[in-house]
Amino acid sequence: MKEKIITKKVLKWYDLNKRSLPWRKKVSLEKKQYYTLVSEFMLQQTQVKTVIPFFNRFIKDLPSINSLAKVNEKKLIKLWEGLGYYSRARNLKKTAQEIIKNFNGKLPNNSEDLLKLPGVGNYTANAILAIAFNKPYIPLDGNIERVLKRYLYLKKEKEIRKDNLVKKKIIFGTTLRSSDYVQALMELGALICKPSNPICSQCPIIKNCKSYRKNDFTLTKNTKKNRDKYFILKVYKKDQKYLLIKNTKFNFLKNLSIFPMEELSNPKNFNENLNFKMSNMNMNIKIQYSKDNQKFPSSYWFDRKKLNSYMLPSFTKKVVQYLEKN
């Protein structure tokens, strides 16, 4: 009974307060499935407000599964440029190709087949089944997890483990409006039950929220330590041009253009010039200017004055900007 009350209240709130997002437009069923697929790949590890302009541009250029399956690598990466985690883009294209080859061009509507697609894990499969196919799945993204943890006041390490959260989400119940309901729970976490300073006065399920009763909204997190890594980044410059190489060496930014780099293991007295956070890696980078004419495979000279006309990851662009300032 309590579950039905939660469902009703959350859906009523959503109908009045939901954001207008491009992948929520009223379109044909086929387009809705395609929009869900693209948006879910883009939203992996990226915030909604960041994704919106990228999604609009992507859909304008690649409006269907067919066009995505046929797009060349250069254009695909250019459309994704700035979103990071470029393996998502490549997996998305491979997924489109698999859908055409093995599923008659239609997005699969069951877990078993969805999980066979490149880049689709349990979360993405559940999100697609709920949003695109209106099936009674509740994927645990960061927003829904936060609502669940606060509503039930889950604090201890064993309480916030993924397997326990999967069991506890039954409290949310089910509805014939599964697609709307999942998006409503995500929206509730994004707009109301925010990581800090939740707006409890506007929450539709405040009455039975245990964190509200205790006036304690602090969240316990599973701590993942960022690994410190150290790199020498070599700068070769000639006639106002920089030398870039195709990265076949490191797992990050695979096959993209970067400066020649070497990883060091636990160096002493390492004075970095730059620091980047990438996934769970803390990159400490020392710039080293080189004059020797060492030859690199898959290298080319890049004109710094035409920065925006090149297909470069944000990482490389930021290094260039640093070099120009210093």
Image (cartoon, helix red, strand yellow):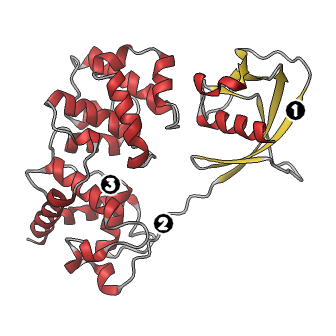
Residue 245 located left or right of residue 57 = right
Which residue is found at the position 60% from the left and 36% from the top? 314
Q: CA distance from mark 3 to mark 1?
A: 46 Å
Q: Quadrant of the C terminus?
A: top right
Residue 238 located left or right of residue 228 = right
- What kind of element bears circle 3? loop
**Near-viewer residue (138 or 294):** 294
The amino acid type of the residue labelled 2 equals: Lys
- What kind of element bears circle 2? loop
Q: Which mark is residue 140?
A: 3
- What kind of element bears circle 1? strand
Which residue is found at the position 73% from the left and 29% from the top? 259
Earlier along the polypeptide chain: callout 3 or callout 2?
3
**Near-viewer residue (318 or 68):** 318
Q: Within 10 Å of the Cα at label 1, are there few (<14), some (14-19), or many (20+) other Cα atoms?
A: few
The amino acid type of the residue labelled 1 equals: Tyr
Specify the quadrant of the image occupied by residue 316.
Answer: top right
Earlier along the polypeptide chain: callout 3 or callout 1?
3
Residue closest to the far front: 305
Residue 286, x across and y down, in percent: 81, 43
The residue under label 2 is 221
The residue under label 1 is 289
Q: Quadrant of the N terminus?
A: bottom left
Residue 32, x across and y down, in percent: 20, 34
Q: Is residue 152 visible?
A: no
Q: Nearer the viewer, mark 2 or mark 1?
A: 1
The amino acid type of the residue labelled 3 equals: Leu
